[in-house]
Structures are given as structure tokens and as C-alpha cells.
């Protein structure tokens, strides 16, 4: 059923019509947007695992859902990469049927509790909300998505999606991040036997190793994975496709199709003097060790470097995760060093606000040009070039220009470089016949298909670095189109 037909069908429901008429548009738009309950900043910087955002109460969710106007043409859905039936799940919340709201979400997303926490709704669904045309805050779609998914999990009301009869075909998935999990869930619904191969010892990909628990608890990710297991998806950890198993090995094992969602785990560096000093590391290493290897514990066998002065280079969400983690590991002065202004930062506004509340210092319009060592070869200072903004570059952001002679030195014991990532080259280098860009990303067509007819790809291995929800959208698209290919259509 096409989206427009689905919307029209649901609007015919008697309860839905009655609910629309229960409050006038004027009454609905007069309601203030819900405020997310949060842990106190001074307390939350003492814990790596307690979630900052506490979630809406039932009362808050009911009131916030009432703000939704149930538009005849829900433009919010146009901003959702996975096509969630947004007004439908919100109206279920408004009438108090929280289980049905969660079930509606799972019609199109395998990770609603994740999306409700980490997706940039303010740039996607909420940016298209009709409230924006009224100069009012959008309906808190992300908060409500999280509420419905959490309620179902906490009340053991997560429904098993309807599964099609078995097709008899096996599908392999490379990577258990958001693209791979989304793809696996949709293929399982379509009746395929799905095996997900993960290189690390933990399932979840970037959801586990890249995003701290104070923003996305592991128990939330584990619950989503458990449902996939109940749907028949199996997982093989410590398996590196392209090394442990080859493309030919997968064919010999009877797989009819392969989805590559191996992400972009190769860190970028600036290639400036001193980047090889002790205490300078990538955000990938820093967060993976803390999130996945318990390196934040001083008694860990491989503890991460700590320091009173910690600098994180970059302005994205990963940079915010890194600097907020440093604060929780005891940094007295935790700094974001970013060569543009705060307005150009790609990080979510919420993440920037949380970092400021937690005492993070923002050194915007600064760019590191060198790191200096102490007598032990450990980083001790960073030299920063002050910048000013010039004309916009091809990305549309104003280009940072060095101010001649404006250089300062700042003490620092730990530097975390978070200036982007590149795709892991293993699969592009070992799968003969793949079309790969000069940046190492796999080329796909509008269907998500590669030049190898049985191989599809999505997420950061294609995009080179993007959001969780865009990766999930890639997984859904690839699943639908691989199904058509394997069905002979």
C-alpha cells in the first residue's frame, strides 16, 4: 500500500476522526511543547552509564501527543528517512494506546528506541512539522517515539512483527550497526534466513562502541537486538568479512545475497606535527575503549589516558560524545577546539547545550597546528591558530581563514581527534568488481545495489559518515530492492 493510500485509510478510522474533533486546532496549538526531564549536570558528569535524558512521563506524552494536528498531508513524514507513520503512532499515544503506538512504529523501523534518542529530528521530521510555519516549536516527535518504544519494552508489550513464509534463501549482512540491523529486520520480515557478521565481540556496531551509555544505554540496544533474534536473525561475532570469510566463501555457504553495512571506522587525522605523541588519539579509539572495553575504569587492564586538560578537535556529535566522556573521566578543563564558529557546528543543538551545561569549554575559531611533547614524549601543549570566517565554501559554510600571527599555546595532557572518518578499506579491496570512489566509499545506484548483482550496501560505507537514521533508511531501501531482485522482479 502506498504511503498516501495508507494515510487516507487510517484517517477513515472512527476513533481517529473522533479524536481529531475532541480538541480544536486553536486548543492544540496553544499547548506548550514538552520539556525533556534531565539529570542534574553536576551529578551526571560523575557517571558514564546513567542516561542524561530521562524520558517523558505518561502525562507529558499524552499532552504532547495532543499537540499533533493530524494533518491531512503530514509533511513530517517527508522528513523521515525510514518512513515512520508519524501521525498514526502519535494519535495512538493521545488516546492512551501506547502498545499500539509502539506497534505502529515497528511497521517501518527496527530500532525505535534508538531513533527516539539519537536521531536529529530537528533536522528531519520535526523540521517539516506544520508548527514550523506558525513559528512555534514542532511537535516533539523524537520524544514521543522514545516514549512509545520504552513503554512497550518496560511493560513487556513489544509485539513480534508479522513474518512472511520462509523463502528458503539465506542472506548475509556485514556489520551490526544501524544499517545492518535495519536491513536484517526487514529481510527477516520478508521470510529470509538472515545472518549478521560482526567483526567485534559485541553486537551493535557504532550504537555500542561509538555512542556513550549516558546518551544511548546498552540495555536499549540489546533489547532491539533481542527482538531481531526472536525474529530469526542470527549473529556471528569476531568474524571479519574480507579476512575471516571471503566473498567466495559466502557463496559456498549458500548465501543468495549480501548487504554491506561495515561503516566508516577508519579515523582521519590532520597530519600536523606531534600527532604521533603519546596521549593523542582518535575519537574512534577513545570512545571504543571506554564504551566497549571498560577503559574508563582505572582498574581496567587497558585504561584510557586521563588528564586534567583534555582537548577534543572537531564539532560533530562524536566530538561532543568524546568531550563529555572526558569530563566524566575527571577532566578539569575539557575543551572543544573547532576551526569554525558555533553556528557552523554539525553537532545536534541538544548535544552542544548538554556539553555547555556540563562545563565544557568551547574554543571556536581555533585550529591546532602542532602538539608539543614533554620529556617523556607525552603531549603537553597544543599550539592553536586563531581563525576568522571568510566566504562560503562548496558545503555552504563560511571558510575559516587563519589570522596571521595569532597563535597561542595551551597546556593539554590528552588530545582526541574527531574530524571525521573514512570507510574501512577491507571489503572494497577484497571484493573484486565493486565500484569504489577515490574516498573509499562503495558506489551504489538508487536501489542500493552495487556493481556486483547480489551485493547491496548502505550506511557510512556508502555515505562516508552520516547519521544513524540515514543508515537505517539505506538498510530499508536495500532490503526492499534486494527482495525484488531475488524474487525475479
Image (cartoon, rainbow, N blue to C red):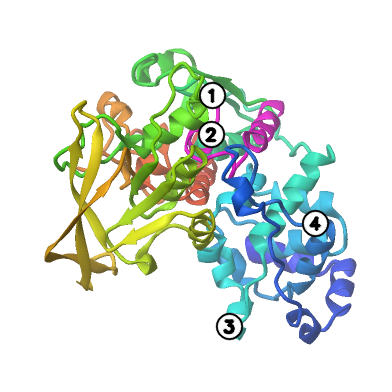
* Residue that appears at 31% across and 57% down: 338
Magenta residues span 202-230
* Residue that appears at 63% across and 72% down: 138
Labels 1 & 2 near each other (Cβ < 8 A) = yes
Q: State yes or no: residue 228 in magenta.
A: yes
Mark seen at residue 202:
1
Question: Dot 4: what SS?
Answer: loop
Q: Where residue 35 sits: x, y (%)?
A: 69, 65
Callout 3: few (<14), some (14-19), or many (20+) C-alpha neighbours within 10 Å? few
Q: Identify the residue under disc 4.
A: 57
Q: 323 or 120: nearer the eye?
A: 323
Q: Is residue 300 above or below residue 279?
A: above
Q: Identify the residue under disc 2.
A: 208
Labels 4 & 2 near each other (Cβ < 8 A) = no
Question: Dot 2: what SS?
Answer: helix
What's the CA distance linking mark 4 and mark 2? Answer: 26 Å
What's the CA distance linking mark 3 and mark 2? Answer: 37 Å
Q: Where residue 313 sits: x, y (%)?
A: 31, 49
In the picture, which quadrant includes the N terminus? bottom right
What's the CA distance linking mark 1 and mark 2? Answer: 8 Å
Callout 2: few (<14), some (14-19), or many (20+) C-alpha neighbours within 10 Å? many
Q: Is residue 380 above or below residue 298?
A: below
Image depth: mark 4 or mark 1 in front = 4
Amino acid at each position: 500500500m502506498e504511503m498516501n493510500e495508507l494515510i487516507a485509510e487510517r484517517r477513515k478510522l472512527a476513533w481517529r476522526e473522533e479524536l481529531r474533533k475532541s480538541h480544536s486546532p486553536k486548543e492544540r496549538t496553544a499547548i506548550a511543547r514538552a520539556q525533556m526531564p534531565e539529570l542534574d549536570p553536576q551529578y551526571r558528569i560523575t557517571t558514564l552509564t546513567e542516561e542524561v535524558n530521562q524520558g517523558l512521563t505518561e502525562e507529558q506524552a499524552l499532552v504532547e501527543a495532543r499537540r499533533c494536528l493530524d494533518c491531512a498531508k503530514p509533511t513530517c513524514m517527508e522528513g523521515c528517512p525510514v518512513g515512520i507513520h508519524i501521525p498514526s503512532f502519535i494519535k495512538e499515544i493521545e488516546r492512551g494506546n501506547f502498545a499500539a503506538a509502539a506497534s505502529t512504529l515497528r511497521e517501518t523501523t527496527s530500532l525505535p528506541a534508538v531513533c527516539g534518542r539519537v536521531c536529529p529530528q530537528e533536522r528531519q521530521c520535526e523540521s517539516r512539522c506544520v508548527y514550523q510555519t506558525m513559528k512555534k516549536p514542532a511537535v516533539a516527535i523524537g520524544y514521543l517515539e522514545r516514549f512509545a518504544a520504552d513503554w512497550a519494552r518496560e511493560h513487556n508489550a513489544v509485539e513480534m512483527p508479522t513474518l512472511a513464509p520462509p523463502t528458503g534463501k539465506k542472506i548475509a549482512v556485514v556489520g551490526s550497526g544501524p544499517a545492518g540491523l535495519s536491513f536484517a529486520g526487514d529481510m527477516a520480515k520478508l521470510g529470509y534466513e538472515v545472518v549478521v557478521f560482526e567483526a567485534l565481540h559485541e553486537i551493535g556496531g557504532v550504537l555500542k562502541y561509538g555512542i556513550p551509555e549516558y546518551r544511548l544505554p546498552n540495555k536499549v540496544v540489546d533489547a532491539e537486538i533481542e527482538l531481531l533474534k526472536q525474529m530469526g536473525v542470527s549473529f556471528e561475532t569476531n568474524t571479519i568479512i574480507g579476512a575471516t570469510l571471503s566473498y567466495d566463501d559466502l557463496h559456498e555457504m549458500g548465501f543468495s545475497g549480501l548487504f554491506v553495512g561495515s561503516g566508516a571506522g577508519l579515523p582521519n587525522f590532520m597530519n600536523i606535527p606531534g600527532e604521533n605523541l603519546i596521549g593523542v588519539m582518535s575519537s574512534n579509539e577513545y570512545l571504543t575503549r571506554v564504551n566497549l572495553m571498560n577503559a574508563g575504569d582505572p582498574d581496567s587492564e587497558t585504561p584510557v589516558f586521563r588528564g586534567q586538560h583534555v582537548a577534543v578537535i572537531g564539532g560533530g556529535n562524536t566530538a561532543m560524545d568524546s568531550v563529555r566522556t572526558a569530563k566524566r573521566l575527571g577532566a578539569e578543563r575539557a575543551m572543544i577546539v573547532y576551526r569554525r564558529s558555533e553556528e557552523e557546528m554539525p553537532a545536534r543543538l541538544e548535544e552542544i547545550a548538554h556539553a555547555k551545561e556540563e562545563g565544557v569549554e568551547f574554543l571556536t575559531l581555533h585550529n591546532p597546528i602542532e602538539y608539543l611533547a614533554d620529556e617523556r614524549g607525552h603531549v603537553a601543549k597544543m599550539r592553536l591558530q586563531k581563525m576568522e570566517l571568510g566566504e562560503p565554501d562548496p558545503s555552504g559554510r563560511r571558510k575559516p581563514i587563519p589570522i596571521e600571527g595569532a597563535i597561542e599555546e595551551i597546556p593539554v595532557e590528552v588530545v582526541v581527534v574527531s574530524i571525521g572518518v573514512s570507510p574501512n578499506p577491507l571489503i572494497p579491496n577484497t571484493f573484486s568488481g565493486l565500484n569504489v570512489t577515490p574516498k573509499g566509499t562503495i558506489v551504489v545506484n538508487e536501489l542500493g545495489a552495487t556493481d556486483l548483482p547480489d551485493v547491496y550496501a548502505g550506511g557510512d560505507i556508502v555515505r562516508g559518515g552520516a547519521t544513524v537514521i540515514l543508515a537505517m533508511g539505506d538498510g530499508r531501501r536495500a532490503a526492499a530492492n534486494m527482495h525484488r531482485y531475488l524474487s525475479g522482479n
